[in-house]
Every structure is written in C-alpha cells, then in structure tokens.
Amino acid sequence: MIDDDQNPQHSAGNEQQGPTPSAGPTPAPDAPPPDVPGKTFPPSFGEPSPLQPASFASPWPAPAIPFDLNVPWSWSDLSVFLLFYFACTTIFSLVIVFATAAAMHIGIKTMIDGHGVLFISLSIVAQALASLSSIFYLRMLVYARSPGGAPQSAEGPWQVLGWRRLGEKTSRASTVFKYVASGVGLAYAVSFVSEFVGQRRKVPFEDLFQSRQTILMLMAFGILLAPVVEEMMFRGFLYPVVARRFGVAVGILTTGILFGAFHAMQLWGAWEQIALLAVVGIVLTWVRARSHTILASYIIHVAYNSTLFAGVLLATNGLRKIPVGN
C-alpha cells in the first residue's frame, strides 16, 4: 500500500490544484512586508513614510551649508598651509640674508649690527616673497581639491577663496565709500583707545622705522600686499572651515583672535595692542561674514592700514623726523 504523500498521481493532482484560498498570494522576494492589523513597519532610513509627510522622512536632516562656507579644503589643509607659510618665510629670509652677506663679504652679525637698514629691507623683501608664494599656494589648492581641476560650484577659484562681488543694493561707489569710511573710523578708534590702554613701551615693530627707505618699503607692503594675503589667509581660508564646523559666531571670534596672535611677534610685550588687533580682526571677520565676501573686509583693511601710515607721515613730518620715537 502506498501512502498518499508518495503516490505520484496524488502529487500531480495536488500540483494541478491552485493555492488554498487561506494562504494568500506569495510575496515577491523584494516586496515589503504585508500589512498586519494593528502593526506598521517603519520605512528605511531617509525614505518617506506613508503615515507622515515627506518633509519628516529623515529625523536628522543634514543642515544646508551656506554657499560662502562650502569650500573644498579641510582642517588638514589648514595645518599644511601653516607649515608652508612659516617654511617659506624662514627659507626666503635665510637665503636672501646669507646671499647678500656672502656678496658683501661680511658676516651675519656684522650685517645686523652695522647694516641695520639693509637687514630690515631684506626682511621685508623676504616677507613679501613668502606672501606671494602663499597666494599662489592657496589658488593651486582650489584646483587640487576640486574634481577635474575646477571648483565644484559655478564660481571660479578666486570666488571660492572669498573674492566675490559686493552684493549691496546701493551703488558700488557708495558701498566702497562706506567700507573706506569704516576702515578710517576703525583706525582712529584703535589709536584713541591705545592711548589709554596699557603702558607705553618699545616693541619690535618700531625697529622697522629706522630710515626713509624702510618706512616706504613697509608702507608699500602694508597697503598693497599685506591686506591681500591676510584677508585670503584668515577670512578666505581659515574662517570658512571654523564657521562650518562650530558656527558663524565661533568662527568670527576664533579668526579674529588668531589674527591678533599672528601679529604678536611684531608687538611682543605690548599685550594690550595685541588685544586691540584681535578686536580689529573680529570686526573684519564680522564684515566678511555679513557680506559673504572678503572684498568688503579687504577694503576696510586697506583703509585701516593707510590711515595708520598716514599718521606715521604726520608724526615724522613727512619722513623728515626719523625715527618716530624722536
């Protein structure tokens, strides 16, 4: 006797019969789980749920990054650039000073003690070369960090570094005048406060004001080149990374404080003056954050430095009374 399970005819008959009505349709392998009364199955993360609006699909939506903070470099790039800048400054200074001393057949100590004006002039030239190298480095970094050698956005490399047009609704002339007036006013305010803050003491920066030659070189560097490279370094390169990670307020404060610390060697010992420069850096960074361009902070920076050097011209009677301390 053969059991029904082993009977070929019985098996064939069962195959001809359709699925029992209570079994229901067989779900496909990739189909979602069937509806079960009293129970809902959550959708995958990031997918809209049939029970809630699509705007609440992800419980932690990624915040949108402002366009002026969406830069292709990172913290590691900041560290590498810092090393690059100080390496360039050191190498250019050593090469220029040693080459000049060798050409003049004198020692380094003799140059510093007996040719102070020449040594200061060479130091300014080395600083200018390091600044130009830094500008070139930052521009090349935009290409290196962008796919295909071009920025990810529709902006060019200079725009990515912060050099955008002034977006004010007023005329361009009135906007530029507003920023120039702000720079002049900031210089007067800092000069006024510095008369009442701290004690008057000699700082290393005053050693640069020894002759008409060094003052003119310093004025050219401080008005034409220093604002460009400092705005690119701090407001164009550093600020977006800090603000993107910790917020705009922290980015403004951090960038301003580091701007003051950057000038600490020039004003070593005059801590109140360093603190005032940090305040200047905070104001410049606030302007950059508000306008979304370093062009605004650059105009204020140039006006600020120009006003201070105009004060030097007045204090020296048109560079006839040198050094300033006299």
Image (tube, rainbow, N blue to C red):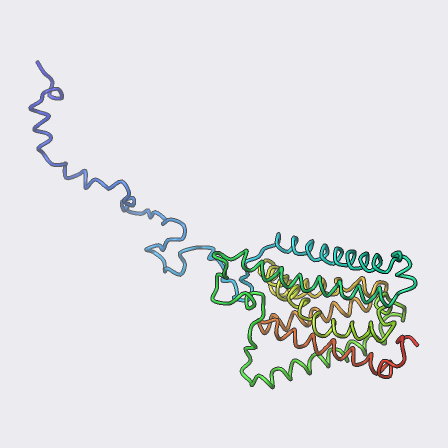
Image position, residue 197 (x, y; %): 84, 72
Image position, residue 87 (x, y; %): 72, 54
Image position, residue 229 (x, y; %): 67, 67
Horizontal arrangement in the rendering, residue 63 relative to residue 55 (left or right): right
Residue furthest top as drawn: 1
Front residue of this view, candidates 185 and 139: 139
Front residue of this view, candidates 232 and 322: 322
Q: Quadrant of residue 275?
A: bottom right
Q: Considering only vertical position in the picture, is 39 above or below 220?
A: above
Horizontal arrangement in the rendering, residue 124 relative to residue 73 (left or right): right
Q: Considering only vertical position in the picture, is 201 above or below 96?
A: below
Quadrant in which the N terminus appears: top left
Which residue: 64% across, 64% down? 135
Which residue: 66% across, 77% down? 299
Horizontal arrangement in the rendering, residue 52 relative to residue 147 (left or right): left
Image mark count:
0
Horizontal arrangement in the rendering, residue 287 relative to residue 214 (left or right): left
Image position, residue 42 (x, y; %): 36, 49
Q: Considering only vertical position in the picture, is 178 above or below 135?
A: below
Quadrant in which the C terminus appears: bottom right
Front residue of this view, candidates 254 and 109: 109
Which residue: 79% across, 81% down? 310
